[in-house]
Image (cartoon, rainbow, N blue to C red):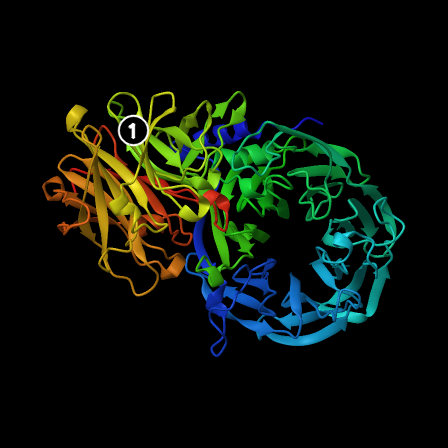
Amino acid sequence: MRAFSITAALAAALAASTAPAAQAEQVFNRIASFAVAGNVPEGVDQKAPTSAEIIAASEDGNTLIYTDSPGKRIGFIDITDARAPKAGGIVPFEGEPTSVAVAGAKALVAVNTRESFTKPSGLLAVVDVATKKVDATCDLGGQPDSVTVNKDRTLAAIAIENERDEDVNDGQIPQLPAGDLVILSLKDGVADCATIKHVTLTGLAEVAGDDPEPEFVAFNGKDEIALTLQENNHIVIIDGKSAAVKAHFSAGTVDLKNVDAKRDGAISFAGDLAGVKREPDAVKWLDDNRLVVANEGDYEGGSRGFTIFDAAGKLLFESGASLEHAIAEIGHYPEKRSSAKGIEPEGMETAQYGDDKLFFVLSERASIVGVYKDTGAEPQLLQLLPSGISPEGAVAIPGRNLFATANEVDLVEDGGARAHVMIYKRGEGEATYPQIRSAEKDGLPIGFGALSGLAAVGDKPGFLRAVNDSVLSSQPTIFMIDATQKPALITEALPITRDGAAAQKLDIEGIANDGEGGFWLASEGDSDKLYSHALLHVNKKGEIKQEIALPAELRANEIRSGFEGISAIGEGDGLTLWMAVQREWKDDEKGFVKLVSYKPATKEWGAVRYPLDKSEAGWVGLSEISVHGDYAYLIERDNLIGEAAKLKKLYRVALTELKPAELGGELPAVKKEEVRDLIPDLKSLNGYVVDKVEGFTVDAAGNGYVVTDNDGVDDSSGETLFFSIGAINAM
């Protein structure tokens, strides 16, 4: 079965999303996000890690219920007004909730209570959604992983994983005791513990058949259960009423073409992988005879996509690397994870929205949800939705045209984003994300990420150049952006080379035109990593022709946070380069950073002092400098994210203020003027406020453009925001 060309389909879908409203397709857009730390009770450490893993919705669609394993609780979110979600409280447990499903007025919660890997245990708790009280519990006899209920709410099925210890025998299986499947009866949402049936799963899989590790479970309309044995690379079909195994089959392997198979600091789809085990995680039924699995891999496989089988195990469709390519096209490819499992499809959801049967594939590492239309044959990719960090679970609420994701990673201990639940609504209009994507080259997407500095193409309105920073350390690149399209389109990628090879040990944070077809680049140094702060002059082919080290007066006081932008004033022998230093260096007065000048013709260095705003938390620094007209424009930001972010602003300094003094002496201070608070722009997609507003420039028509650095999807949601703030001269 051939893989569907998703990049072409996505381009068509994105183009269709900009059609007039009267002809617009139905699209999902994010309307709200909720940091689940907002549900942490008083008296509990507010900065302890939280999580949102598996998520369900009440039957009226007004309440979301998610599992928070680190907090040993489930949380409730009131989405009566879906655009303004509210904390709805918690229910604590003695163990770790692993999954939740709703049956009528009750929530069924699978709770892991194990003493150890060799003494697994767990229970099923029945929680009243209205009162948030535990009505009853059933002993499951092992460690549960996934719970689901059938269509008429009379049966529940729980996958008992009894997961392996990855620190024992290098994580190799078998590691007993074996897992199984539990089926029990429900009445008005309440579990009847006396009806529990254990379905033996040993002896089925070719891989470690005596140690099945059930992962995910789903009912079809005939009360048949599809169950994945992830590490065993196997799928089992069980009759829910009789608890008899009806069929079972290997999930098989995939030969992958054009994948990034190396973790080498570059996005390159030049690799091939043969015989990769699918090792599916989530499974959902598309109808009573077809099921779709997300091939995460967690042991020896992970084929980076999804697969559709019939109930007898016949292969109906294989996505191959196509979803991965589509994700790379919008800058979400997680290169630091690519050598093993790439984007790691993990979670899934299916639902009927109007006339469309849709399924959703959650990419854990890319922090993206692929929205597909089930056509009965090759599925059609409709959208890629931005999620929080590592989407684990999702729930469709078609009666309200809503969809929600649970994003498990909480980076509070590192000062990063909290775990979030994100809410989307389907309706007519334009897809608001992505705001930038890449074209194809030789049939494959141009890989990009971690965009930092911007520069205008002097004679072409709406055309810009951008650079990427050291996240893609083996792939320093100058990109051409056509911002006249919607989304903006990266049309070209010019490698930065040294002696004919990709230039190493660079952290490009700024770009300026040299007036001769080439570019000046600012590279931020890190002495601990054996590369220095520097200016680079490259020609129109991207070849480094000159590397200029900092003078001794600057080097003596350097820290890691160096040049974060570069801009040029004048031309020829009168050319002066200006660079913004991100943070105070050792010789700077608190609250002031340097704007450094360099004249290539005379090799003269100089500087002025720039006053930073104050912040109650974190640090404040500069991210960009860009000259337009009579002003130098600078981005000033705190290093905070989400609700903690307070300062993401565009300022300007009159060029008449830029009168550099010699280094080592007293430097004059410039005056600044606020141009725009960028936080409302960063909130416009209804996610959390991202930290790194890194690029700004003004195009040939006088319009300002802003781009954010997505850190290459490393401890980041991966979202790249790219937007115009309109005519600069009018501000």
Name the spot of residue 162 as percent of width and height, x first: 77, 61
Depth check, front residue: 192 or 119: 119
Q: Residue at x 28, y 54 (%)?
A: 584
Indicate left or right for 45 with 297 as reference. Answer: left
Q: Residue at label 1? A: 462
Quarter of the rendering containing residue 64: bottom right
664 above or below 475? Answer: below
Name the spot of residue 673 as percent of width and height, x first: 16, 49
Q: Is residue 249 visible?
A: yes
419 above or below 563? Answer: below
Indicate left or right for 570 with 83 as reference. Answer: left
Name the spot of residue 365 as percent of width and height, x first: 57, 46
Q: Is residue 394 visible?
A: no
Quadrant that contains the N terminus: top right
For the residue labelled by badge 1, is the local secondary structure a helix, a strand or a loop? Answer: loop
| Circle 1 residues within 10 Å: few <14, some 14–19, many ≥20 | many
Indicate left or right for 629 with 412 as reference. Answer: left
Quarter of the rendering containing residue 308: top right
Depth check, front residue: 21 or 181: 181
Depth check, front residue: 633 or 134: 633
Name the spot of residue 146 as percent of width and height, x first: 70, 58
Q: Residue at x 53, y 44 (%)?
A: 368
Quarter of the rendering containing residue 709: top left
| Three-letter amino acid code at the position of disc 1 | Gly
Q: Residue furthest left?
A: 656
Q: Residue at x 31, y 52 (%)?
A: 679
